[in-house]
Image (cartoon, helix red, strand yellow):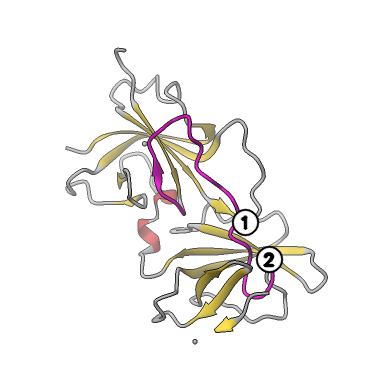
Amino acid sequence: MGTLRSGRGWIPALMVLLVAGCTVTDPNVQPSTSALSSAVTTPSAPAEVAVKKGDCLDDIPTGFAVVQCSDPTADYVLLENLPGATSDCWQVPGVHMQYRHKDAAGATIGVFCAGDVGADPAAGINIAQVGDCVAVGTGKRGRKAPCTEPGAFRVLARFEKVAATRDTCQGIPAATKVQGVRLKREAAQSNPDNVFDAVFCLAPAR
């Protein structure tokens, strides 16, 4: 139980990125989508537990605990609480992690959408569109970035719910990098087709 507490000839580089994880440079290695448990007091938050937008969360083995945002253990901040068992956090700006929200009987009644503490949701890579620039790479949390930032890449194309392979951006000759982005979801099911929430075809911004 949790607790309440204060990416011959044209071959673009292929990289995959968990929104909530680190960049993986080996295309044969799938990033882990193993669950952090769910919210606040159980593997998913019971309805009677008060958790609201702006609350900060510390991941713990059995779920997450609500903590003060000044607490050094604070990993995420709650961005949205979406009702409905089939709701998905992907479109929430700045989201990195999705947790199920369960009622007292254990039925899923919604999802909690969490982002990094202190991060600007408007810079979330999940909302980057064609023409935007992003910062991605080994050891980086993907995000939208100024096109003047050293090492930034411009988004030439964006595809939704597709596999991140070298063929994905084959029709975009200027692309030099393929970047797959996937939201980390609690109790994520297996993904044998390596489908990502979004795949970006990128080229150096300058």
Q: Main secondary structure of the magenta part?
A: loop
**Residue in the picture at 79% in, 64% down:** 107
Query: Is residue 34 rendered magenta in the image?
Result: yes
Q: State which region is magenta.
A: 20-43
Picture quadrant of residue 66 = bottom right
State the CA–CA distance, disc 1 to disc 2.
Answer: 9 Å
Q: Residue 7, position in %: x, y? A: 36, 36
Q: Quadrant of the C terminus?
A: top left
Q: Residue 185, position in %: x, y? A: 59, 53
Residue type, numbered disc 1 = Glu
Which residue in the protein does label 1 denote? 186
Q: Residues at badges 1 and 2 in contact (C-beta under 8 Å)? A: yes
- Circle nearer the N terminus (1, 2): 2
Task: Categorize mark 2 by other alpha carbons within 10 Å: few (<14), some (14-19), many (20+).
Answer: many
Which residue in the protein does label 2 denote? 43
Q: Residue 163, position in %: x, y? A: 52, 31
Considering every residue shown, the one lying at the far top of the view is: 8
Picture quadrant of residue 138 = top left
Left/right placement of residue 149 relative to residue 117 reads left
Query: Is residue 50 rendered magenta in the image?
Result: no
**Residue in the picture at 48% in, 29% down:** 28
Considering every residue shown, the one lying at the far bottom of the view is: 6
Residue type, numbered disc 2 = Pro
Considering every residue shown, the one lying at the far front of the view is: 61
